[in-house]
Image: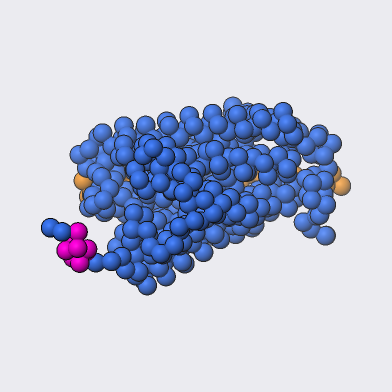
Amino acid sequence: MSYLSVYLQTPPPKLDSGDTAWILVSTALVMLMTPALGFFYGGLVRRKNVLSTIMHSFFSLAVVSVIWVLWGYTLAFGPSVGNAGIIGGLDWFGLNGVTGINTTYAATIPFPLHMMFQMMFAVITPALITGAFAERKRFKAFAVFLVLWLTLVYCPIAHWVWGLQGAKGWLGALGALDFAGGTVVHIASGIAALVCALVMGKRTGFGKEQMEAHDVPMVVLGAGLLWFGWFGFNAGSALSSGDLAVSAFVVTHISAAMGAITWTTLSWIRQGAPSVLGAAAGAVAGLVAITPASGFVNASSALIIGFGAGAICYFGVVLKSRLGFDDALDVFAVHGLGGIWGAIATGLFATKAVNPAGNDGLFYGNPGQVLIQLAAVGATIVWSGGITFIILKVIDVTIGLRVTEKEEVAGLDVVLHGEEAYQL
Amino acid sequence: MDTGLLIVGAAFFVIQFLAWFVLPNSKQVTEKSAEFSSIGDEAKSKASV
């Protein structure tokens, strides 16, 4: 068969207006999650630090967007250097060549839309980490950390799992399943958060004075908007508007609901009252855990995944309190442990009946998938933990990580930003 | 397998539903918990007045 006849028989890539509309909306939904995270974290800190905490998320939205256009997208999704599946090349630096349709990633939507959709994932991932160092990190240390972490941790891991151009990322080639970012987003950020908490040390007065959430309605507002945005995060990851997107939408909602119920019940049993903060945190835990599984599991499995997330993350918070490290807003317990549970659960509950392009998990006759998922978890923990530690040490030596004790007591809003959240 | 997973998932909900019948209606309020039950610093400053 001649090249000409192949050319004539192969239909050219065709834009689908329905798919494009859904991914446009999903991109906007995922974008909303970062300010929502700002509210979620902002409500959890003391009133003197609410602006500095919200600023972490908002500034991430701005800085990461620029990095993504310049070198982030090409490192994460660009043609794999040496076809090794380790890191993308600089072929698409400054979005050079990111036009038309890229059939490797999504055959029915514009290439720049894939870039934008993935940009929003990159934006929220380092913003998630900020909960671990809230109320004590210098702003310029945060700004530098943001650029380095995204470049050195997020982009490589995204390439390992989701890279397809030239060669599959090595974890993707291994068969690791991560539909919407369980390893890339949640384990990577959760482990980085743990390292941040350990390297930076405790907040002044930690364990001696109450550091309760200053605005619980703000936390619930943030959690509600996160839940809303998560439909774009997971269902949008189908990169089309068909059955798979709907399935991901359904299981995302079920897992969030079950996570909220379970954390609430556990807080009710252990503390004597159904915690409102617990309901919000439980919903987020359920959302985190279903993220890698959302394109591979059915509704029954989502009930179990949500239940597991609520229970595991709740006891993760309890354990943190006993161990005594100061992960200020429980990022490791919710995103680290929730992400690990979600990645393993994907290996347990995945079924080709939901997604023929995926694989079966342990309960559908393929126990090897669990081992592959564990390998992906381990690789992400090692890389994120190790590189985050190095980045923090370099910043500490050069510009310093923490504000002074006096500045910490005064509050970061006034000291770092010259503004106050409330004029009461 | 799908039916088995549905039964397990449903059981996780039903067990919690049954637990709600016996869980307390209201939290026991102690002097310490009242002091910190409201909004952070504001509650503490009121308590100290």
Report the side of A202 relative to A89 (left or right): right
- Image coords of residue B10 (percent x, y): 32, 50
Q: Can you tell which quarter of the image residue A202 is in?
A: top right
Of residues A413 and A271, the one nearer the viewer is A413
Q: Quadrant of the C terminus of chain A?
A: bottom right
Residue at 58% over, 55% down: A65
Q: Is residue A197 above or below residue A67?
A: above
Q: Is residue A184 magenta?
A: no
Of residues A116 and A369, the one nearer the viewer is A116
- Image coords of residue A320 (percent x, y): 57, 32
Main secondary-structure element of the magenta-colored stretch = helix
**What hue does chain B carry in this figure?**
orange
- Image coords of residue A99 (percent x, y): 44, 62
Of residues A301 and A378, the one nearer the viewer is A378
Q: Quadrant of the N terminus of chain A?
A: bottom left
Residue A75 visible in rendering: yes
Q: Which stretch is magenta?
A: A3-10
Residue B37 visible in rendering: no
Report the side of A30 relative to A300 (left or right): right
**What hue does chain A carry in this figure?**
blue
Residue at 82% over, 49% down: A414
Q: Can you tell which quarter of the image residue A15 is in?
A: bottom left
Residue at 43% over, 48% down: A78
Q: Residue furthest toward the bottom?
A: A17
Report the side of A336 relative to A222 (left or right): left
Of residues A359 and A201, the one nearer the viewer is A359
- Image coords of residue A304 (percent x, y): 35, 46
Q: Is residue A233 above or below residue A88?
A: below
Residue at 63% over, 55% down: A62
Q: Is residue A181 above or below residue A377?
A: below
Q: Is residue A224 above or below residue B39?
A: below
